[in-house]
Amino acid sequence: MPKKELPFVSILMATRDENPQYLQEAVGSICRQTYTNWEFLIMDDGSLSSANYEWLLQQAQSDKRLKVYRGPGVGLAQALNTLIPRARGELFARMDSDDRAYPDRIMKEVEYLLRYPTTVLVGTWIRIINNDGQPIHLSCPADYFNSPWSRPAHSAWCGRMDALKNIGGYSPDFPVSQDYDCWLRLQQKGRVGVVEEILLDYRWGRISSERSIEQLQYFWIANQIHRKKVRIKPGDLSLVKAKLQRYAFWYDRKFQSQSISQQAMRHWQQNNYQLAAREFLQSLRVFPLNLRTWVCFFLALIFHEYPSRFTPYFKLRLVASRIFYLNPKPPSLAVCLHYNGRKPAHQRLALIIPTADRRRVLARFLESTIPQRGRIAQIIIVDGGKVPVKDLLEKFSQLSIDYVRASYPCLTKQKNQGLDHVAADIDLVCFFDDDIILEEGALENMLRFWEENGEEVGGAAFNITNVEKRKTSFMKKIFLTGSEAKGRIMRSGYGAMLSPVDDSIFTDWIFGGATVWRREIFRHYRFDEWFEGYGYGEDLDFSYNVGKAYKLAVIAEARVQHIKDYTEGNDHVLFGKMQIVNRFYIVTKFREFSKILFLWSSSGQMLENLYMALSRKKRIYFDRLAGNLSGLWSIMLHPPRMRPPDQPGRAR
């Protein structure tokens, strides 16, 4: 007798006293899926009426993929945990009994998980509907999966069954917000992804205030456990609940206020700003210390009075983000932007290494590439030093190295010269500073990212792991010379630090010393040869320009080390001058930057160098301060000549 094929996807649903119409729509939407290798496990968890259970049994008789069970009413988490051991699929999917799945939902989620083996969970965009089935708004922000604090609709989940079993399924300690707790624990097992397409109608009905407050309480408990790492015994939440009881007056009012604000946001989504303002005001009466609620309250008043004039310009984010940052969105996780059915393609990689009179450093870099030479199709050494290093390269005969001699050391000119020698069959071009060391698997992990992502990505940076993690100082935040959000660019011309990162992220710019670029972008972009010497700021200039048309990323698993060589004398006065002059060139080159904020940040840069010089008593900071002052004097007397951003330019 032939072996019966097992279903690949097990769809889990628990229901209790559901509206019969909603239940029929939910089950019918799954039965109409274009992907057919699934089983649908449904638990009637103690419904008072047997009508829904009997209807489900009838459907199971006509469609053998439906498996119907009846439980004693143990709650959503326990009901789903009862279904998990009975599931036979390698993947699981969730479905709520009052939602509607689009026909291609399961198919596109399965394709996504097959394409990305390291992803343990995927969700989709959703359309929120009311009790009458009418759309309220589309839930599809670009940063839907950016933060562990946000999560997709539980009903839109599809993931790997072994990961769900490894975390023990849903926690029975959470009578509500069990999806958020499960979501945080699944993140510890692997990546999450999103199919950027609306594939689910999510019914958003009004819930009681007591239920809403309870959800917020357990939401807070989950954050305490998983985000703040409060140590508790499994199944024992008494330590966290004791904190809630100890400060009951504070937390009760806070959660009650948040519950009212959630109702206000529902009015907001329906453009009913008058009711939203009333709800926000009620929330403030309960807990007046919530700054966000105050902002929402005044915005609701403005929208109500002047909807046509102000609505297009105001969003629910801080106005300061638009004033001080070029991109007000925070960095997002570097997952696939949009799945389009492509299969991962093998990419041929070329390495370009500009160098000048640093034989020992260059040899150290080449030694780190030998274990990973199988993924390298071409290596180009562009030598601008006084003493040629061609004889050194003979010691690395196992590497395919092309030697190019530059007339003088200029980082941007050497990069452009190396591009002219890239072979015709190369897909990706990688630039390395000669003082970089590749860690094990760096190129393999970088290429895996490129093979999994589409043409919307233009450049990606390696993760420099030997950089000390530091919190951005208050002075840097005030003067816009730094930011906690990695990879963001301030309008002052300063870019926030990139490495090290714990997760791969999309950014506004990438560090030029260890980057990979799509070959085709160099048909339209070249490095600006205005930047002399080692080209301070050229990476921000080039990557920001490319980032207007392509996505840029920093890949956490592609790990390298940046071992700076301090044996040669560094001109710190020249470096301080470059901090001002080169950044002023970038601010002037791109009109979206602000010269006023540049001057504000430059004053902060000088104050920082002065503070470091006085506190640490090191001459290099005095030299940099002198260079800063020289740079300001230089741009006042002889402003740098500008050229259009899309022209590579020539050396000065």
Image: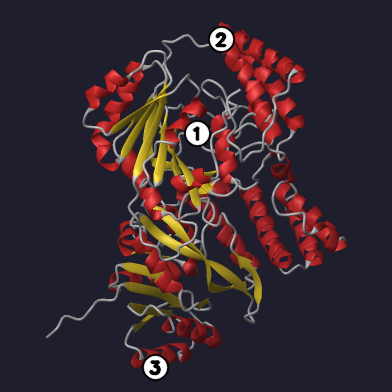
Q: Please state if 422 lies on the left or on the right of 593 as rendered.
A: left
Residue behind mark 3:
58
Which SS class for mark 3?
helix
Quadrant housing the C terminus: top right
The 10 Å Cα crowd at callout 2, few under 14, some 14 to 19, many 20 or more, is: some
Is 19 drawn above or below residue 401 in the view shown?
Answer: below
List x then y, in percent, for residue 291. 73, 46
Is 173 drawn above or below residue 642 in the view shown?
Answer: below
Residue behind mark 2:
620
Give the alpha-carbon distance from disc 2 to disc 1, as whole Å. 24 Å
The type of residue carrying mark 2 is Ile
* Label annotation for residue 511: 1
Is 369 drawn above or below residue 69 in the view shown?
Answer: above
List x then y, in percent, for residue 633. 73, 15
In the image, what residue occupies the spot 66% across and 60% down?
259
Q: Nearer the viewer, residue 445 or 235?
A: 445
